[in-house]
Image (spheres, grey):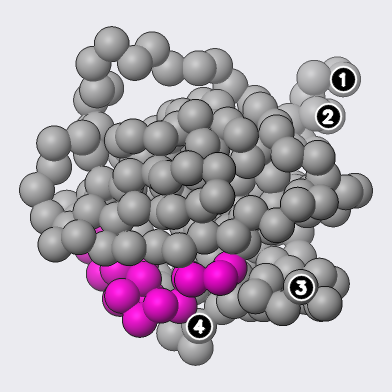
Amino acid sequence: MQSRMIVKIAAMALVLGGSLFLGMGTLVAADKPPAGSAEGAKGPKATIKTKFGDMDIAFFPQKAPKHVENFIALAKSGFYNGTIFHRVIPGFMIQGGDPNTKDATKPETYGQGGPSQRVKAEFNDIPHRRGILSMARTNDPNSAGSQFFIVVKDSNFLDGQYTVFGEVVKGMEVADKIVNLPRNNHDLPTERAEMTVVVAE
C-alpha cells in the first residue's frame, strides 16, 4: 500500500507549477548504446554548457521531429542562454529551459515560463532511461514549449506520457553534479546552475 502511494505521489508531481515529473528506477549499463540510442545519430547535435561541465546531446528527429526542430530553433536564437536548471530531484531528473529563471529575483515564477509557441505531443517508444532528454509540459499533452528534463535514473513510468527527443551522449557526470546540488523545499538548487546551449550542425 505504501509503495503504491509513493508511485502515485511521484506521478502527480509531474505537473507542478506549470511544469512536471518525478520517480525512481535503475541505472543503465553503459557498455554499449541501448536500442534506440541517439549515439552516432546523424544530424544536428547540441552542447549544454554549465560551470559544472558540458553535456553533449544527440537527437531523435525520426521519433520527435517537431520537438527536435523546436529545441534547436530556440537554442540557435539564444533563448536558453542564462536560464538555469530550476528543479532537481536526486534519483530522478534535472529540469530547465524556463526563461523566467533568467531573473534571479523572481523564483516564485520558475517553472511557469516558456515561448509563445507550443509543440504537439510526439510520444514514442523510446523509454525514459538514464540520460534521456524529454520535454516538460502541463497536464495538457500538447503544451510543450521550452522546458525540458534530463533523466538521471531510469523512470519508465513516464513512458508514453512525455516526449523523448534526445539523449546525453557525453557528460552525464555533469547532470549527476547538478542533481545533487543543495536545494530548497521547491527542489530549486540554492546555487544557480546556469546554461548556455550551443548547436553544431
User: Picture coordinates of residue 107 (x, y %)?
Assistant: 81, 70
Q: CA distance from mark 2 to mark 4?
A: 35 Å
Please tell me how crowded label 2 is: few (under 14), some (14-19), or many (20+) other residues with Cα within 10 Å. few
Residue holding disc 4: 115
Secondary structure, mark 1, is helix
Q: CA distance from mark 3 to mark 1?
A: 38 Å
**Residue type for callout 1:** Gln
**Residue type for callout 2:** Met
User: Picture coordinates of residue 73 (x, y %)?
Assistant: 30, 76
Tell which circle, 3 or 1, labels the residue nearer the N-terminal end. Answer: 1
Question: Which marked residue is nearer to the observer: mark 3 or mark 4?
Answer: 3
| Residue interval drawn in magenta | 64-83
Residue that appears at 70% across and 57% down: 192
Q: CA distance from mark 3 to mark 4?
A: 19 Å
Residue holding disc 1: 2
Quarter of the image for residue 25 reads top right
Residue that appears at 49% across and 29% down: 173
Q: Are marks 3 and 1 in contact (CB under 8 Å)?
A: no
Residue holding disc 2: 5
Quadrant of the rendering where the N terminus is positioned: top right
Residue that appears at 13% across and 42% down: 41
Quadrant of the rendering where the C terminus is positioned: bottom left
Residue holding disc 3: 104
Question: Which marked residue is nearer to the observer: mark 2 or mark 4?
Answer: 4
Quarter of the image for residue 171 reads top left
Q: Is residue 183 magenta?
A: no
Q: Is residue 37 left or right of residue 42?
A: right
Q: Are marks 2 and 1 in contact (CB under 8 Å)?
A: yes
User: Picture coordinates of residue 4 (x, y %)?
Assistant: 78, 24
**Residue type for callout 4:** Pro
Q: CA distance from mark 2 to mark 1?
A: 5 Å
